[in-house]
Image (spheres, rainbow, N blue to C red):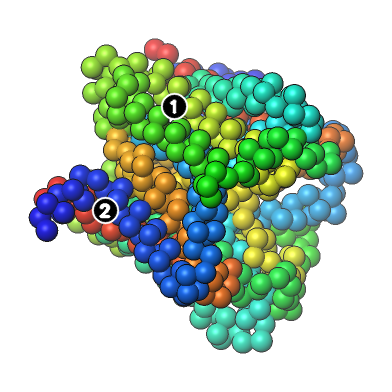
């Protein structure tokens, strides 16, 4: 899988080894997803159809949105351990309140986003470890979800169900939405002034602060944006599953962290990649499909996700070592 | 009064015990003194499990920011299943099975640290990847019918001496031993030194790699031990058995007064925090609160504690 890359590079002007390593590293998420897709298509050619892709990527959008939320938190070197229970709570709100009382439901969801922004301000203002604060929040979201929906049930509003099931031409909706999120967030984080400042707040907060930007507002804004993506993820999820329960998205916490890391994100220095994170999320989703085509029992699905994570990280460690060599 | 204040600031872990006692008093005041002893006894029993995993997590967290063991729940599920399967309900196999579980714990710790070291990735990601694999192993391995623990093992895990569970006694001894290890041995002091400043510790001649290696193995061994004991306590292993221990293991460490930034630990505080959390839930239970309210209260308290702790630290620095 590495052979495909150096070839066109060598044909041009032989970039310096460091630059080549950087290119390799940023290509890694895309290459690993491509390898996975090719393996699936070879194993099961029928998967290469509208219906096949739709089936495989059915639940990709909520996971991609959750990964995007986690990525925004990781941008400022924090970690959100409450994301899964937050998304579950949003799903419960959507399945109970949003249908009969649209205004109340929307207000509750906006309130959730405000809570996230307030958390960002709290974490920054009092210099608290985000891991512990979000750990506490995960209990609170979970408790609120159970209060709202003590047993699995509820129904997503019909318009929401219709919205997530739109049949788009050529490719399934999931692919368009994922591409849209990736490109939009890439344009925002990598190309806009505000995006550079947000990433700078993770890389060198002092420099950003000295330049006159309010770090408090930056953090509150990033957390609020993460909350927005969490809300979108919950809405999309409940639209697909039509009913909710309080544990519906608990595994998203760890999956979203894994997706960000697979996509080339790092815990320090505001190094994140929106395109990479979406690709990472898709890789994790497709890993399950590959296993079922290989006739391996679903018992190993989580394990395969772990193995892919380790494999990609090992490759990246190799690339980094390449870079370190003079 | 001032001497009282001095002794409090020297022993920050007292707070969690005081809170636990207050909650216990509130509960028995509500029930009119009924079941006070029974409540305390079961609190000690359940807290023992939190404390075992908390001990490992405490050592890991002490080695500095970013160090956290996320593989604990999967480890508990796997080692619980492993222990029950190897014992196969036969009292004669208890010792070999326990030994095998401990070996599995060491292996898991080595795997965790191997990932951290070889891939040079943050411990959170390393233990997360490892936990995915362990979880799959636990699902595949523990699929068979629920195997009951041998009666002798079950009796040890659930038995009591004058109302105090054997396990609570054993874990108290373990806690005391680990407190000595942290404060008095060379290994423990290096753990603290690395947590305060890894670079300085390295320059002072500390073998940072080896110390962290030992710490991750320690955490994995304690989680494995917790797994097999928990399986014995609940009459068999189950896959979801370890789930609550991820958040709980971090919560007891933080509420117990250990600094999340590393370098400053509070071993006795683990007991106070574990008792506090258990008694809080049972108090809300007695008051007739629903599961949702109980979870929300737990969350609010974790956040309140971390805010209070940070306020105190910042106040002390000024």
Q: Judge left or right: residue B140 versus residue B168.
A: right
> Does residue A44 appear anywhere in the picture?
yes
Name which quarter of the figure residue B16 lies in. Answer: bottom left
Residue B5 lies, with reference to residue A101, above or below; the image says above
Query: What is the crowding at mark 2: few (fewer than 14 residues within 10 Å), some, or many (at least 20)?
Result: some
Frontmost residue, B96 versus B261: B96
Q: Residue furthest front?
A: B162
Residue A160 locus on image (x, y percent)? 69, 74
Q: Judge left or right: residue A132 versus residue A316.
A: left
For the C terminus of chain A, the image quarter is: top left
Measured Cα–Cα span from mark 1 to mark 2: 26 Å
Residue B41 lies, with reference to residue A320, above or below; the image says below
For mark 1, what is the residue? B215
Residue B37 lies, with reference to residue A203, above or below; the image says below
Residue B23 locus on image (x, y percent)? 41, 64
For mark 2, what is the residue? B310
Frontmost residue, A254 versus B209: B209
For the N terminus of chain A, the image quarter is: top right
Frontmost residue, B57 versus B129: B57
Q: Residue at x 72, y 45 (%)?
A: B235
Name which quarter of the figure residue A105 lies in. Answer: bottom right
Q: Residue at x 49, y 63 (%)?
A: B36
> Does residue B126 appear anywhere in the picture?
no
Residue B155 locus on image (x, y percent)? 67, 40
Chain letter belonging to callout 2: B
Q: Residue at x 55, y 54 (%)?
A: B42
Query: What is the crowding at mark 1: few (fewer than 14 residues within 10 Å), some, or many (at least 20)?
Result: many
Q: Residue at x 47, y 18 (%)?
A: A321
Secondary structure category for the residue under label 2 = helix
Residue A195 locus on image (x, y percent)? 39, 53
């Amino acid at each position: 899988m590495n052979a495909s890359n150096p070839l066109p590079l060598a044909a041009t002007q032989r970039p310096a080894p460091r630059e080549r390593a950087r290119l390799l590293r940023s290509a890694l998420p895309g290459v690993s997803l491509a390898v996975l897709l090719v393996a699936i298509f070879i194993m099961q050619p029928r998967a290469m159809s509208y219906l096949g892709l739709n089936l495989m990527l059915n639940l990709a959008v909520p996971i991609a949105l959750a990964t995007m939320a986690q990525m925004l938190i990781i941008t400022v070197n924090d970690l959100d351990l409450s994301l899964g229970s937050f998304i579950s709570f949003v799903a419960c709100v959507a399945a109970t309140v949003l249908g009969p009382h649209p205004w109340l439901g929307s207000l509750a969801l906006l309130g959730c986003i405000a809570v996230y922004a307030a958390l960002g301000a709290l974490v920054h203002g009092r210099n608290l470890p985000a891991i512990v604060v979000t750990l506490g929040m995960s209990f609170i979201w979970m408790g609120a979800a159970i209060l709202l929906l003590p047993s699995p049930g509820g129904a997503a509003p019909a318009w929401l169900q219709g919205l997530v099931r739109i049949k788009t031409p050529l490719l399934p909706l999931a692919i368009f939405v994922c591409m849209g999120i990736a490109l939009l967030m890439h344009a925002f984080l990598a190309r806009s002034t505000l995006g550079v400042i947000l990433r700078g707040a993770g890389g060198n907060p002092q420099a950003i602060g000295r330049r006159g930007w309010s770090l408090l507002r930056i953090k509150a804004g990033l957390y609020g944006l993460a909350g927005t993506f969490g809300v979108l993820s919950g809405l999309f999820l409940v639209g697909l599953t039509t009913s909710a329960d309080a544990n519906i998205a608990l595994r998203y916490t760890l999956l979203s962290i894994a997706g960000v890391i697979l996509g080339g994100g790092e815990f320090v220095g505001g190094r994140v990649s929106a395109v990479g994170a979406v690709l990472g999320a898709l890789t994790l989703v497709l890993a399950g499909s590959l296993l079922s085509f290989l006739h391996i029992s679903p018992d190993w699905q989580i394990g395969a996700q772990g193995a892919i994570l380790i494999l990609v990280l090992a490759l990246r460690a190799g690339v980094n070592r390449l870079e370190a060599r003079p | 009064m001032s001497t009282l204040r001095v002794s409090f600031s020297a022993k920050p872990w007292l707070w969690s015990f005081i809170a636990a006692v207050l909650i216990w008093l509130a509960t028995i005041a509500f029930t009119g003194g009924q079941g006070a002893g029974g409540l305390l006894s079961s609190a000690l029993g359940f807290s023992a499990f939190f404390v075992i995993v908390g001990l490992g997590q405490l050592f890991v967290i002490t080695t500095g920011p970013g160090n956290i063991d996320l593989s604990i729940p999967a480890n508990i599920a796997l080692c619980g299943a492993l222990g029950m399967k190897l014992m196969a309900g036969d009292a004669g196999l208890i010792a070999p099975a326990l030994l095998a579980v401990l070996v599995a714990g060491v292996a898991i710790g080595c795997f965790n640290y191997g990932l951290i070291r070889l891939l040079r990735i943050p411990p959170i990601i390393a233990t997360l990847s490892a936990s995915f694999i362990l979880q799959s192993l636990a699902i595949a391995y523990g699929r068979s019918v629920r195997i009951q623990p041998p009666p002798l093992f079950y009796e040890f895990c659930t038995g009591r001496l004058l109302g105090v569970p054997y396990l609570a006694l054993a874990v108290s001894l373990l806690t005391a031993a680990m407190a000595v290890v942290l404060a008095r041995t060379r290994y423990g002091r290096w753990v603290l030194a690395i947590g305060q400043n890894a670079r300085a510790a390295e320059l002072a001649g500390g073998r940072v790699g080896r110390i962290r290696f030992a710490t991750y193995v320690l955490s994995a061994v304690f989680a494995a031990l917790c797994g097999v004991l928990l399986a014995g306590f609940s009459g068999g292993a189950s896959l979801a058995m370890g789930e609550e221990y991820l958040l709980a293991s971090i919560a007891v460490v933080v509420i117990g007064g250990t600094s999340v930034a590393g370098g400053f630990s509070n071993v006795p505080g683990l007991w106070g925090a574990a008792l506090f959390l258990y008694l809080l839930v049972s108090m809300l239970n007695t008051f007739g609160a629903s599961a949702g309210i109980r979870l929300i209260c737990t969350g609010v308290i974790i956040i309140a504690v971390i805010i209070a702790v940070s306020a105190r630290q910042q106040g002390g620095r000024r």
